[in-house]
Image (spheres, helix red, strand yellow):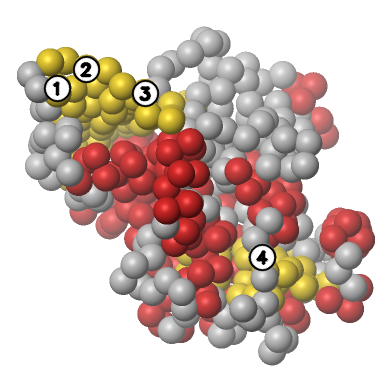
Amino acid sequence: MKELRIGIIGTGMISHRHMTVWSNIPDTKVVAAAEIDEAKLRQWGEQYHIPSDCLYTDFREMLKRDDLDCIDVCVHNNLHTPVSVAVMKAGFPCYSEKPMASTYADAKILYDAQKTYGQKLAVQISSIYNLQTRYAKKLVAEGKLGDIYHARSVGHRREGRPGMDMPFFSRDFINKEIGGHGPLGDLGIYHLAQMLYIMGMPKLQSVYGCSTDRYFQDPRLLPGGLKYEVEDLSVGLARFEGGISMDIYEDWAMHVDDVGSSFIAGSMGGLKLIDVDTTGGELAQSKDGSIIGGGMVQNPTLEFFGYEDGQMVSKVIDCQANGRREALVDPKVRLYNDNQVHWAAYVRGDLTDENRIDSPYIALQTALLSEGIIISGNLGRSVTADEIEAMSEPMGVRRQQTPWGVIEYDF
């Protein structure tokens, strides 16, 4: 098999997690990297044994190479659209970090760029590339839940605002110009995208939402005039075609130990999703068992509640154990169990537009729902899907000041 040669843009925390996964995928190799911070770039290059002549402070210089098969974009939220569009415009398939963008308007620009430039695109949403999601989607498709009428999407941290309470993460997370929004665009994309995908991508009709940043902000964690500029909690109630409702809860910090699990409820059965993958799965696991950025590898599990032979039953489905057995019977299923494995197969042509998971479309619809919560909160009323599309405004960075000059983005 031909080696897949990859270039990375952005060498912050998430790039290290991507590198862990790439190191666990045969016949893939990161051979070049770009980062505006030269000191960080050089240190990164030394860590991963990338020659100095393959390190670039201006990613546009890296895109002039003709020996790269695809580009992995690991920059922050409001740079996803400008950088990823530039990647595809330069003629490269693009794998972008989540969220697709901070606003629906920017996400739509990036989504449309696939067709404009004739390039492949994927968005990192680890929660939809694992056994928990695949089995849940299969149970829904087989009608085991009956008619779905409600879902709950939940994400909670006792205290974990990246860039503030979690210093290993960049301060850009709490900067509105670069980070855009808080937990909805961070862990929220994993939970919302997973719910939408399992339910078959129901069409959004309307949403009512509220957001706040009222969790205690210790001034000692905001040195030198640094400001906390994004939300720490967002909640919403969405309505979809077919009479499906979804309540949404996503926080970075809350004075409570547990807010429950995500679930899907149908007329004949329900599913509880436990330990949803938000870190990248087993391939993102370092040699010591940890996950770069904090935490340990997760074990996504399903609980089924419903009827069998007229009796109420409760079952626990060990997704990982079943998945390992399934892969022995049919090795091709492994292509659907990890983001980057799936992307590599798509770039090589082992997966096509017909049988890949369409993460750009899933991410686009997630952006529509996420921004609906924000817009609704700002207006103090519910908003329709059409209103979200009409009111959404780009937040993508148009002009980026770097230590060595200015980058002007055209998208």
Left or right placement of residue 342 versus residue 219 in this view: left
| Residue at x 43%, y 39% (from the top left corner) | 322
Real-space CA distance between mark 2 and mark 1, rounded to the nearest whole angstrom = 6 Å
Residue at the extreme top of the image, as rendered = 256
Residue tagged 4:
26
Q: Looking at the image, is 404 positioned above or below residue 308?
A: below
Image position, residue 180 (x, y; %): 54, 47
Query: Looking at the image, do the residues carrying marks 2 and 1 touch, with CB atoms under 8 Å apart?
Result: yes
Type of the residue with mark 1: Tyr
Type of the residue with mark 4: Pro
| Residue at x 52%, y 10% (from the top left corner) | 256
Residue tagged 1:
307
Q: Is residue 371 visible to us here?
A: no
Real-space CA distance between mark 1 and mark 4, rounded to the nearest whole angstrom = 43 Å
Type of the residue with mark 2: Val
- Of mark 3 and mark 4, the one earlier in the sequence is 4
Which quadrant holds the N terminus? bottom right
| Residue at x 46%, y 74% (from the top left corner) | 350
Type of the residue with mark 3: Val
Q: Secondary structure at mark 2?
A: strand
Label drawn at residue 316: 3
Left or right placement of residue 148 versus residue 381 in this view: left
Q: Looking at the image, is 196 positioned above or below residue 220?
A: below
Query: Looking at the image, do the residues carrying marks 3 and 2 touch, with CB atoms under 8 Å apart?
Result: no
